[in-house]
Image (spheres, rainbow, N blue to C red):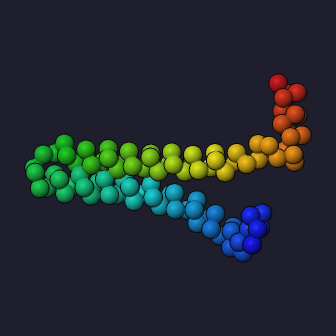
Amino acid sequence: MSKSEKPKYAKLIESADGLSLGISIVVAILLGVGAGVLMKNSFGYDWLLWLGIFWGIGGAIANIYKAYKKQVESYAEFKDNVRYKEYKKQDNHEE
């Protein structure tokens, strides 16, 4: 199979990749809350729950950033494509 050919289930894989972002956000937050509850119950400090929540939110934000970078890289291949040069010219004239 050449590089230009897409696998038979490429659309399904791309859709699952987008769905996995949503799932990974929820899982990151739940893991952070779970870790916070566990630390709070183990050590008895209420602020450890909030620390876990912030860790979960931080993990979710990191997942979003990684997905964003992956999308930017995938669109970079269109930058020099001849098919899209005309659209770029039209956008420049409108400004």
Q: Quadrant of residue 84?
A: top right
User: What x and y, as percent, mark residue 21?
Assistant: 51, 57
Q: On the picture, is 70 further left or further right than 25? A: right
User: What x and y, as percent, mark residue 40?
Assistant: 16, 51
Task: Write the residue at 21% across / 55% down.
Answer: 37
User: Is 34 in front, or is 63?
Assistant: 63
User: Quarter holding the N terminus?
Assistant: bottom right
Q: On the picture, is 74 further left or further right than 50? A: right
Task: Write the residue at 71% across / 72% down.
Answer: 7
Q: Is residue 48 above or below residue 2?
A: above
Farthest residue in the front direction? 2
Task: Write the residue at 84% across / 29% down.
Answer: 92
User: What x and y, as percent, mark residue 83?
Assistant: 87, 48
Q: Is residue 46 above or below residue 35?
A: above
Task: Write the residue at 72% across / 75% down.
Answer: 8
Q: Quadrant of residue 28?
A: bottom left
